Amino acid sequence: MFSLNRVHIIGYQTQPVEVRQTPGGTSVTDLNVVVPYTFKSEAGEMLKGKGFHTVTLWGAMADIAGQYVKAGSQLFIAGRLQTDSWEDEKSAEKRSKTKIVGQDLIMLDPKDGQLKAPEGAPNVCNVVNKAEVVGNVTRDPEMRTTTNGQQVLTIGVATNESWKDKSSGETKDRTEFHNVVIWGELAEEVSRCVKKGNRVYASGRVQTRSWETQTGSKRTTTEIIADSVCLLGIANSEANDAVERSRNSSYDQSAPSASLDAEPVAAIPEISYTSEVKAEDLPF
């Protein structure tokens, strides 16, 4: 695997599910999933927001969603980001939309309905919006300063995907281009250290924002708001030291791993792995 393009979300389906059939007879459906979240404002105040995500499901997964997923159902979805581009028939403008192509779907609601949210426990009631990419930086970082003086940086990251076409047997490739937005001190560090062509790991949340053009057309863009960025393929002195120590060490492989005069370790209590879950208690 040369790159990574992975998204995990836990959210709620907002509308009834409609399954369509392709000309070849494959089932497909688009979910509209809302993911509520909390964030800290510039003044330090905790605010609430929500993001909406289009999730495309194919084949048996689409059929299952059509049968069991209802408006309001809580879902776990794992997949990848995919951007589709086309040309508007009327204006000839280039348009694009980013969606999540679902690869795993788990229905989270119990058989007897959703539980009431406990009071005073915001952390355990959180939902999930997590995106991870490993790829090459497509352009040099672009640092900007907001009107209130905050530093914000945007980098492009390209990921690749390969698959074998079922009908032709040919190997096909697809490249996705991700906009990664970084704020604050992390933005300043990335701007100093990361350049076009570097390989990076970035993780954060998926966010789609909308705006209106001067002609009145609505536009949207989907970004990864990163809270972690790692420069890859670089030397690490501590790792090199460990490798060197391992290379230079000499030991008898037949000897026990623990020293005979080492202090005794407290016995670990035996753990029973017998499941207490009954089949009738499962929510599916």
Image (cartoon, rainbow, N blue to C red):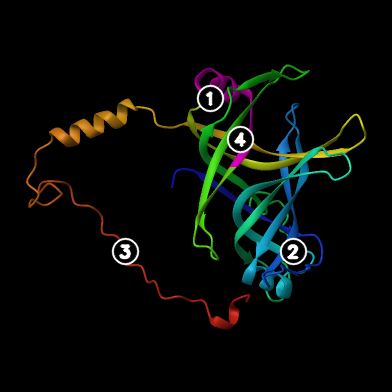
Q: Which residue is mark 3?
A: 269
Compared with residue 53, is residue 235 higher up or lower down, i.e. above or below? Answer: above
Q: Position of residue 62 (x, y in %)?
A: 68, 68
Q: Earlier in the sequence, mark 2 or mark 3?
A: 2
* Distance between mark 3 and mark 1 Cα atoms: 53 Å
Q: Earlier in the sequence, mark 3 or mark 1?
A: 1
Q: Which residues are magenta?
A: 176-195
Instruction: Kindly state the secondary structure of the residue where label 2 is placed.
Output: loop
Q: Earlier in the sequence, mark 2 or mark 1?
A: 2
Q: Earlier in the sequence, mark 3 or mark 4?
A: 4
Q: Earlier in the sequence, mark 4 or mark 2?
A: 2
Residue 226: give its label: 4
Instruction: Kindly state the secondary structure of the residue where label 3 is placed.
Output: loop
Q: Which residue is mark 1?
A: 196
Q: Examine the structure image and report whether residue 33 is included in the region drawn in magenta.
A: no
Q: Which residue is mark 2?
A: 116
Look at discs 2 and 3 and give the one toward the viewer.
2
* Distance between mark 1 and mark 4 Cα atoms: 18 Å
Amino acid of disc 3: Pro
